[in-house]
Amino acid sequence: MKKFIITILFLSISLTTFGQKTPSYIVKKATAASEYIAAEMNLDENQQKNIYTILSEKYDSNRKDIRGKNLSNEEKQKIYKASFTKTKQYLSEKFTMKEVNMINRLHRDWQKKNKK
């Protein structure tokens, strides 16, 4: 009986941990943004992957923090500002500060061009 309970517990934890897949629209958005930035800055494939990873984590984190919580615009702006700061920190671990600033500028340009 003890083995059965441990097995069920392990399976339920595994399913909840590994079952949280990033939504496809976030993957598409991060892919498009990272491709745009990489093309504009002539980045190599590894640098583009770093940007993709950071942006997809940012988009997914924002989605989880905001979706379904009925937040005011002010509360959403606080989340976006904190996300920007965290993203800038992650980028600075992989790129120079000049490159980070350029990535942020290009990301804003991409967002303006692709606003729905």
Image (tube, rainbow, N blue to C red):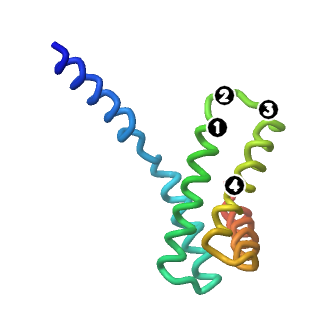
Report which residue position mark 3 lands on: 72
Label 1 close to label 2 by CB (< 8 Å): yes
Q: Decide: is 57 above or below 2.
A: below
* Cα–Cα span, label 3 and label 4: 21 Å
Nearest-to-viewer mark from 2 and 4: 4
Q: Decide: is 9 above or below 91.
A: above
* Cα–Cα span, label 3 and label 1: 13 Å
Earlier along the polypeptide chain: callout 4 or callout 1?
1
Amino acid at dot 1: Asp
Amino acid at dot 3: Ser
Amino acid at dot 2: Lys
**Rendered residue at 60%/72% (across/down):** 94
**Rendered residue at 68%/69% (across/down):** 92
* Cα–Cα span, label 2 and label 4: 21 Å
Using a 10 Å C-alpha cutoff, classify the residue at mark 2 as few (fewer than 14 neighbours), some (14 to 19) or many (20 or more): few
Report which residue position mark 1 lands on: 65
**Front one among 107 and 115:** 107
Which corner quadrant of the image does residue 40 belong to? bottom right
